[in-house]
Image (cartoon, rainbow, N blue to C red):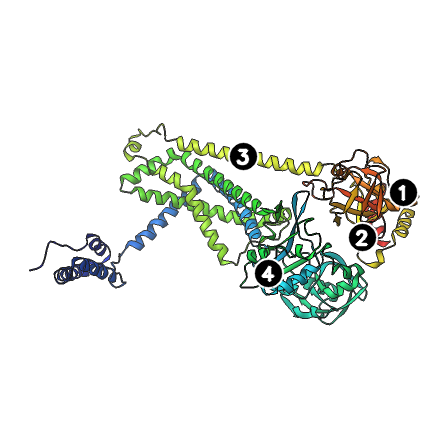
């Protein structure tokens, strides 16, 4: 006798009936049931249930699964019908279709442009193979109780890291700053930015060599050129082994040509050439002294962390390496740390020793704006669709009367929504393609639509589907909820609360729109403020020329005389820094009444006596420099920020010390904006000297044509 008080699992039985072929169902069900009762009687109920489930799952195979003979055909025909009806509705209501498609296309265009920008930002520096292990060695220093973070480091730090922590790094390389240099061969001369680097730098940057080798810098007399630099100098001929000069004073030969670094790299427009470090050391006498100076922060240091080392752990290990090598280690409390290349672009801001982000906030901000703009377009689509509900109510009523299910109506309206979004996306691609050149100029990028990238099309398809669901979900649910009886009797009326969702959407739409408008106005006012902020000098007609080779040095007086004789300029001066930044800063200044705990850190700029007249700075106290006063060689001029920092009321005539030399303050000038207009003015000391100048400043004659004046300057 079979034990009948236990029965097979009900859920497993339902699962079997849901998929098994009809011609197998009776036979298989009987066999499984028979086996179940046998297992219960011979073993246990638990064993029987587990075995029953196992047998049911085993039948989930292609040969046993029930197939629908006409379902796929019917489904295809049904969706074909949906799209045909949607297409006819678009043609019948051309004005409505134009507004709907145009509105969606505009919103999708903005969202797609922002998406391309975000992708470009997030992929910054990915060109370099080991970007996730490349770091820049930086340092924190404490000045007046505040921690400042800087990329400039002392030269001895490189050897110290190699000797003490060499196993934590694959490569360590010192580098100079990237400046404009004159590269020449024969009569051909070009101006390109480049750096002097140690041997490991090409490996750190994983430069893609077109000819030659990354190891060419082992020869101090070799140079690596970018493809564009090599072509500019040597044309289509092979550049390897060709002789050339740097700044008309250093003879080198081409040891390799590498692919130009792309625009979304930190080194784009920075390394059109790389020259050897040993060659750099021979170019200036002060560089040899700097090799032992731990307080001379005039260099950059890059490294590639070893595969088994963790960047944060290594950063903690090397934290006190500089403090251990300097005598006065508590003065600025220097702390060395590693800044990963992956964070250079998006997380480059530091405040009081803490990374506060950077452009990553802009990425998040624009991402949110893109979502809001797309949301506005979708809300506009929803409102237009539901506003036409009465015109489609009879269609819904008739369809439901002849047997259409609500799910079928929802599918129909979602299909129409997808058709509209699809047309809008095609229009979006055209709009984005036409606006990208303008957008690239605005954002200083070189973005393109990746037509051949399958990932782009995959995300585009997903973007289109999500937008169609977002835009069409509410209209589909709303329109499919009509009661057919009321519609066909003519008694259909929109309920009291039926319009509530649409009102909510309109409120959301206006709220987001007003928020975006207010944000745009605030940003515009910030930009206008920075543009109209008093600079403290006269920019009109002011020209800066970098002294890129020895031929420029010591020629200021000759050039001034020639250009003044030609009536091209009003004045000419020389300075150690351009108007866009301060190239040198240092501490160690002292003055009467200085607080012993005050750690001075001033910007230093060396200028010739005509500098003030050339840039037309505003003298607030005292006087300007003068060639006629011999004592002005030991005179200085302070800006207002320096006077405020020093906390002195009458600085003119007082003496300040900087190491052993003593200087007399002869004047105070109004603060000049020479760095970011959003940053506070840096306390600055101006020295009168032409020994350290690297820039010419020319004040053009306003009564002459600028192009003619510049042609005369170029000829001179």
Q: Please indicate whether residue 514 sits to the left or right of residue 462 in the image.
A: right
Decide: few, some or many residues near mark 1? Use Cα within 10 Å; few <14, some 14-19, many ≥20: some
Q: How many marks?
A: 4
Disc marking residue 613: none
- The label nearer to you, 4 versus 3, is 4
User: How far is the residue under mark 1 from the one under mark 3?
Assistant: 56 Å
Contact (CB < 8 A) between labels 3 and 2?
Answer: no
Disc marking residue 626: 1
- The label nearer to you, 3 versus 2, is 2
Q: Is residue 151 above or below residue 381?
A: below
Going from N to C along the chain, the mark reached first, 3 or 2, is: 3
Front residue of 65 and 642: 642
Q: Position of residue 343 (x, y in %)?
A: 58, 52
Q: Position of residue 694 (x, y in %)?
A: 80, 52
SS at badge 3: helix
User: How far is the residue under mark 4 from the one under mark 1?
Assistant: 52 Å
Q: Please indicate whether residue 192 sits to the left or right of residue 172 in the image.
A: right
Disc marking residue 515: 3
**Mark 4 sits on what residue?**
128
Going from N to C along the chain, the mark reached first, 4 or 3, is: 4
Disc marking residue 694: 2
Q: Please indicate whether residue 261 sits to the left or right of residue 689 in the image.
A: left
Q: Is residue 474 above or below residue 302?
A: above
Q: Position of residue 627 (x, y in %)?
A: 91, 45
Q: Is residue 254 above or below residue 82?
A: below
- The label nearer to you, 2 versus 1, is 1
Q: Position of residue 575 (x, y in %)?
A: 81, 48
> Farthest residue toward the top?
496
């Amino acid at each position: 006798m079979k034990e009948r008080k236990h029965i097979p699992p009900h859920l497993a039985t339902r699962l079997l009936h849901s998929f098994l072929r009809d011609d197998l169902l009776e036979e298989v069900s009987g066999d499984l049931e028979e086996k179940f009762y046998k297992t219960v009687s011979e073993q246990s109920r638990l064993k029987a249930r587990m075995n029953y489930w196992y047998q049911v799952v085993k039948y989930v195979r292609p040969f046993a699964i029930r197939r629908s003979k006409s379902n796929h055909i019917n489904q295809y025909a049904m969706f074909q019908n949906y799209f045909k009806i949607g297409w006819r509705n678009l043609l019948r209501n051309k004005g409505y279709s134009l507004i709907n498609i145009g509105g969606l296309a505009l919103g999708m265009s903005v969202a797609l442009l922002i998406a391309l920008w975000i992708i470009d930002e997030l992929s910054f520096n990915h060109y370099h193979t080991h970007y996730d292990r490349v770091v820049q060695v930086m340092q924190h220093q404490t000045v007046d109780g505040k921690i400042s973070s800087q990329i400039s480091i002392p030269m001895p730090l490189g050897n110290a890291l190699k000797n003490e922590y060499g196993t934590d790094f694959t490569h360590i390389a010192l580098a100079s700053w990237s400046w404009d240099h004159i590269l020449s061969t024969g009569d051909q001369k070009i101006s390109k930015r480049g750096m002097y680097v140690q041997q490991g730098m090409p490996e750190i940057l994983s430069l893609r060599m077109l000819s030659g080798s990354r190891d060419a810098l082992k020869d101090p007399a070799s140079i690596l050129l970018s493809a564009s630099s090599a072509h500019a100098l040597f044309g289509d001929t092979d550049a390897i082994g060709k002789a050339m000069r740097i700044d008309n004073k250093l003879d080198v030969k081409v040891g390799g040509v590498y692919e130009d670094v792309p625009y979304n790299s930190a080194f784009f427009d920075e390394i059109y050439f790389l020259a050897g470090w040993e060659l750099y050391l021979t170019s200036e006498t002060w560089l040899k002294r700097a090799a032992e100076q731990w307080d001379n922060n005039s260099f950059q240091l890059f490294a590639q962390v070893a595969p088994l080392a963790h960047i944060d752990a290594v950063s903690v290990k090397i934290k006190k390496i500089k403090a251990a090598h300097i005598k006065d280690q508590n003065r600025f409390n220097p702390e060395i740390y590693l800044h990963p290349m992956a964070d250079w672009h998006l997380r480059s801001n530091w405040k009081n020793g803490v990374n506060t982000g950077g452009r990553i906030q802009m990425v998040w901000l624009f991402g949110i704006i893109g979502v809001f703009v797309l949301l506005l377009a979708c809300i506009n689509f929803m409102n237009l669709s539901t506003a036409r509900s009465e015109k489609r109510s009879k269609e819904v009523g008739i369809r439901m009367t002849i047997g259409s299910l609500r799910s079928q109506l929802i599918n129909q309206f979602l299909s129409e929504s997808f058709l509209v979004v699809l047309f809008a996306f095609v229009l979006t691609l055209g709009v984005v393609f036409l606006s990208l050149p303008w957008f690239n100029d605005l954002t200083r990028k070189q973005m393109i639509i990746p037509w051949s990238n399958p990932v782009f099309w995959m995300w585009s398809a997903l973007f289109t589907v999500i937008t169609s669901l977002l835009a069409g979900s509410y209209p589909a649910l709303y329109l499919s909820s009509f009661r057919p009886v009321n519609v066909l009797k003519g008694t259909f009326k929109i309920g009291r609360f039926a319009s509530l969702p649409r009102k909510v959407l309109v409120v959301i739409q206006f709220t987001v729109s007003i928020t975006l408008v207010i944000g745009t106005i605030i940003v515009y006012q910030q930009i206008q403020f920075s543009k109209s902020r008093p600079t403290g000098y006269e920019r009109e007609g002011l020209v800066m020329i970098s002294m890129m080779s020895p031929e420029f040095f010591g020629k200021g007086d000759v050039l001034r005389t020639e250009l003044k004789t030609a009536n091209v300029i009003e004045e000419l001066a020389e300075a150690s820094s351009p108007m866009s930044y301060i190239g040198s800063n240092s501490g160690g200044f002292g003055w009467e009444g200085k607080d012993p705990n005050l750690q001075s850190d001033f910007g230093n700029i060396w200028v010739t006596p005509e500098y003030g007249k050339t840039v037309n700075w505003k003298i607030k106290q005292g006087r300007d420099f003068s060639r006629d006063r011999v004592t002005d060689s030991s005179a200085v001029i302070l800006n207002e920020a320096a006077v405020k920092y020093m906390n002195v009321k009458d600085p003119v005539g007082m003496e300040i010390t900087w190491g052993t030399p003593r200087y007399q303050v002869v004047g105070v000038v109004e603060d000049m904006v020479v760095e970011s207009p959003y940053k506070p003015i840096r306390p600055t000391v101006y020295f009168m000297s032409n020994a350290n100048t690297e820039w010419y400043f020319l004040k053009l004659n306003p009564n002459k044509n600028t192009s003619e004046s510049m042609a005369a300057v170029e000829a001179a």
